[in-house]
């Protein structure tokens, strides 16, 4: 830049001197010399003009190369026309740097496009005007061709889809049923909001969970049939054995009559147990649909506290904020919490200072979370994955339907229930509602 500045200043100084000399010669009436000096001044104007024009032209070539991403250019042949040698390396270095950045960006874009088009989840990105900014191959396969430009274009094949995509919020998992090719499938939809180039965009991911649901349903049926078979065989086998004994034609004396009486009592007891078992199964399957309403979480916990205190069950409360409200079926939520708190109390039976705490707060997505924790005996790791299976119990005399009912209640509220436990350290049950 120093040589460029010197060259520019030298031309300007020469032009100024020629102008001053022309004026001086006119003042002393040396008109012939003045004409020559004026011609020289005009020549310096032309030289300065050409110098600036060529420099601007070369700078324009650099700008055009950046604008049109044409980086296969060189400035070395222009050093004597406009650019000075020290500018050439700088401009070529700038061109090389832009070229490297462009290649890096293109490689990254190709990588992410390839990655997102390989996954089996449908992904689409749209703005507040419902214009689809990006869509992957799985989404195109899901929604069919031609490629939709706006989410309202999905109405033709999926009438409810646009409204669902616009309403879904971050942190929410929305279950969507679609009918395609005569089959009904379920998609799990999640959303993320982000900003790009000053524009607010929403990314929605749609995952086909029908195979997972079918596999889970099949496993659930297998577990249920296994439990039912086990319980019924435990009752029917002794009943058949006693019935065979009673059908003995030689059982006629008084001693045999007493044996028959005891057998009948055993048959009655086992039959009643089987009836009670079936009754518990009916309870599990007859959970009513929730009647949703808004109510104070503190009032619900206070009512549960008064109810359980009468049975000698005590627990502490931590509700933040104190005025938090829940939108759910209060009766069903009370039933679930009573079951969980009673289980916690039973787990603390051997503890010298039992501690049960119920805390309610809102998570980062502003959804209410209820946590019931205790310092009881805990649950063995190999048992934890079975704790919500119907009729499975670790308590003597337990029915095994309490936690199963709690899960059914949370599912009916589009919520979740999770359990964390360590043997001899305690258990924590987390109920999350989606509101």
Image: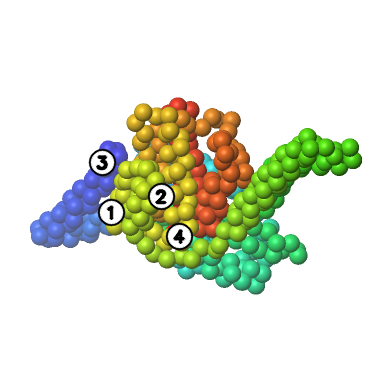
Please identify the quarter of the rendering in which residue 381 is found: top right
* Element type where label 1 sits in the image: loop
Q: How far is mark 4 from mark 1, CA to CA?
A: 21 Å
Task: Determine contact: label 1, label 2, CB under 8 Å.
Answer: no
Q: Which residue position is annotated with label 2?
A: 369
Q: Which residue position is annotated with label 3?
A: 6
Q: Which residue position is annotated with label 4?
A: 331
Q: Which residue position is annotated with label 1?
A: 322
In the image as oriented, which residue stretches furthest toward the right?
249
Q: How far is mark 4 from mark 2, CA to CA?
A: 17 Å
Choose the circle earlier in sequence order: 4 or 1. 1
Look at 89% across and 37% down and name the residue there. Answer: 250
Task: Determine contact: label 4, label 2, CB under 8 Å.
Answer: no
Look at 29% across and 57% down and name the residue there. Answer: 323
Q: Position of residue 98 (x, y in %)?
A: 46, 43
Choose the circle earlier in sequence order: 4 or 3. 3
| Mark closer to the observer (3, 1) | 1
- Circle 1 Cα neighbour tier, 10 Å, few/some/many (<14 / 14–19 / ≥20): few
Q: Position of residue 347 (x, y in %)?
A: 46, 35
* Element type where label 2 sits in the image: strand
Task: Determine contact: label 3, label 2, CB under 8 Å.
Answer: no
* Element type where label 3 sits in the image: helix
Look at 32% across and 43% down and name the residue there. Answer: 316
Choose the circle earlier in sequence order: 3 or 2. 3
């Amino acid at each position: 830049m120093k040589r460029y500045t010197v060259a520019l200043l030298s031309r300007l100084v020469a032009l100024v001197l020629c102008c001053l000399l022309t004026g001086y010669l006119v003042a002393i009436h040396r008109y012939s010399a003045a004409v020559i000096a004026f011609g020289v001044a005009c020549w310096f104007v032309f030289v300065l003009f050409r110098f600036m024009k060529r420099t601007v032209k070369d700078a324009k070539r650099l700008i055009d190369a950046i604008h049109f991403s044409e980086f296969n250019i060189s400035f070395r042949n222009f050093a004597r026309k406009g650019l000075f040698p020290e500018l050439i390396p700088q401009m070529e270095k700038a061109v090389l740097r832009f070229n490297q950045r462009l290649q890096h960006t293109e490689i990254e874009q190709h990588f992410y496009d390839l990655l997102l088009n390989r996954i089996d989840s449908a992904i689409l990105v749209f703005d507040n005007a419902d214009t689809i900014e990006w869509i992957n191959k799985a989404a195109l396969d899901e929604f069919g061709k031609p490629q939709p430009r706006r989410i309202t274009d999905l109405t033709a094949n999926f009438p409810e889809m646009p409204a669902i995509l616009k309403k879904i919020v971050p942190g929410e998992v929305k279950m969507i049923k679609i009918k395609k090719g005569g089959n009904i499938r379920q998609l799990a939809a999640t959303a993320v909001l982000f900003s790009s180039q000053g524009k607010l965009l929403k990314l929605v991911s749609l995952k086909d969970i029908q195979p997972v649901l079918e596999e889970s349903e099949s496993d659930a049926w297998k577990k249920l049939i296994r439990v039912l078979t086990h319980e019924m065989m435990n009752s029917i086998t002794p009943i058949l054995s006693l019935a065979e004994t009673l059908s003995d034609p030689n059982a006629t004396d008084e001693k045999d009559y007493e044996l028959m009486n005891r057998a009948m009592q055993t048959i009655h007891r086992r039959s009643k147990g089987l009836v009670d078992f079936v009754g518990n199964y009916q309870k599990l399957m007859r959970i009513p649909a929730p009647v949703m309403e808004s109510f104070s979480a503190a009032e619900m916990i206070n009512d549960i506290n008064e109810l359980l205190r009468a049975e000698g069950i005590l627990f502490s409360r931590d509700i933040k904020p104190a005025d938090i409200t829940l939108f759910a079926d209060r009766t069903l939520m009370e039933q679930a919490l009573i079951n969980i708190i009673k289980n916690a109390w039973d787990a603390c039976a051997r503890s010298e200072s039992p501690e049960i705490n119920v805390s309610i707060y809102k998570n980062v997505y502003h959804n209410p979370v209820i946590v019931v924790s205790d310092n009881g005996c805990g649950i063995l790791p190999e048992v934890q994955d079975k704790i919500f299976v119907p009729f499975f119990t670790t308590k003597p005399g337990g029915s095994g339907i309490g936690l199963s009912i709690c899960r059914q209640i949370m599912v009916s509220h589009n919520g979740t229930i999770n359990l964390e436990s360590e043997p001899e350290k305690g258990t924590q049950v987390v109920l999350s509602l989606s509101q």
